[in-house]
Image (cartoon, coloured by chain):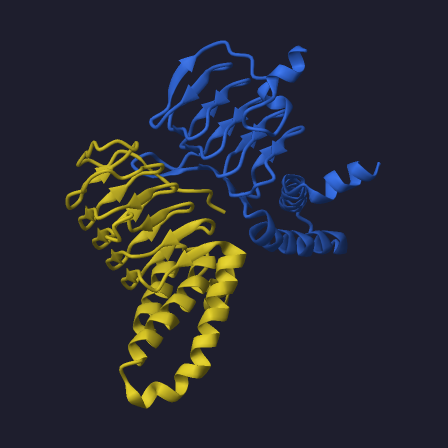
Amino acid sequence: MGSLAWTLLGSRGLWLLTSHRMAHLCLRRRNVRSPLWWITRLCKSLGAAFNVIFCRSQFAEDCEIDGVAYLSNDGYLFCGALTIGAGSLIHDHCTFGHTVAGGGEGRPTIGKDVWIGPDCVIAGPLTVGDGATVLPGSVLTFSVPPRAVVKGNPARVVRTNFDNSGLRRSLAVVPDVAADNV
Amino acid sequence: MTTAFMADVRRWIEVDKGHSAMRRVFADSYGLQTLFAYRLGRWLLCAAHRYHLWPLLPVCWPVYFLLSRCAREAYDIRLELSADIGPGFFIGHFGAIRVSHCRIGANCSIGQLTRIGAAADGRGPVIGDRVWIGAHAQIVGPYRIGSDATVGAGTVLQGDIPEGGCSVWGTPRVWCDVTTTIDGCSD
């Protein structure tokens, strides 16, 4: 029990997610007459400053996270995605945003059960398919089919029909697969 | 200092149309707060040559160190005084921005998680006016970037960029037509 409480308090990814959910609720359920809304609004503003200083991350308020998503504790996540699917795991130093010159103003949509490694840039009106894997250091500017593996700058598909459930099991970038096989 | 900083503020208002009120500009923008500390530090460096300003120095240097330390700890934006940044600099986001030992022209923009600095031999890049530097870009070494150039997201620069050129996708390839440039989240 003690270790669970410690995990919840010490997990900055969880703080970020909580604060984002509050901001999202505040945006969706806008009601100027309700004092509860104003309290949420105040918490949202405090949470945004908290995110910047302690979690080192920024979340667009209208980003829709349906279901459970896992965010890294290391921060530096700049998320402007439209949606993030359930079961996705996102590592630190990632940028999801829109292209500004020549590419329009679209924003990415991230599917279910996606694993995104550290130091990735995902930009433009693209879709990352369900179960896709984006390897560390990729710069993604095109849509990814479901269950594909992409890597590189520019990113290209290196493998199709890859099961990333092993990767999504822990927040470590290189999971301890050997422990599972014993 | 005042002229350059007012140029920064004007640029911020111009780029970020949503925040037109001056009060909100300074409250919301991490970049401007950091730039204020940086401009103050640069001004103090110049003030060392003006004897009538010497009484100000013992007061202003601690203020500078306090402000820049706060910006570094809170937002992780490091604008070293060894960098020569022109007026109208725009920092869109916070986070792991390191600028040192370089010369940057007027009206440049910089994304998050970028690094501009000197290589091991101590020679830094020279960047022209109105250059757009995308997120996750690394410009480390004695490279020259012409005016109106674009450095794409995730680029690790390995060569010079001519005037109006565009370097994307991390390789030494240089295309002179702007294809895709990338920004962080807009909110």
Measured along the vertical axis of the image, is residue B18 above or below residue A130? below
Residue A181's spot in the image, x, y percent?
65, 11
Front residue of A158 and B3: A158
Residue A15's spot in the image, x, y percent?
67, 44
Q: Is residue A10 visible?
A: yes
Measured along the vertical axis of the image, is residue A142 above or below residue B152? above
Measured along the vertical axis of the image, is residue B154 above or below residue B2? above
From the image, state the color of chain B. Answer: yellow
Residue B150's spot in the image, x, y percent?
25, 43
Residue situated furthest left in the rendering: B162
| Residue that appears at 31% across and 62% down | B82
Measured along the vertical axis of the image, is residue A117 above or below residue B11? above
Residue A180's spot in the image, x, y percent?
66, 14
From the image, state the color of chain A. Answer: blue
Residue situated furthest front in the rendering: B121
Front residue of A173 and A182: A182
| Residue that appears at 68% across and 42% down | A18
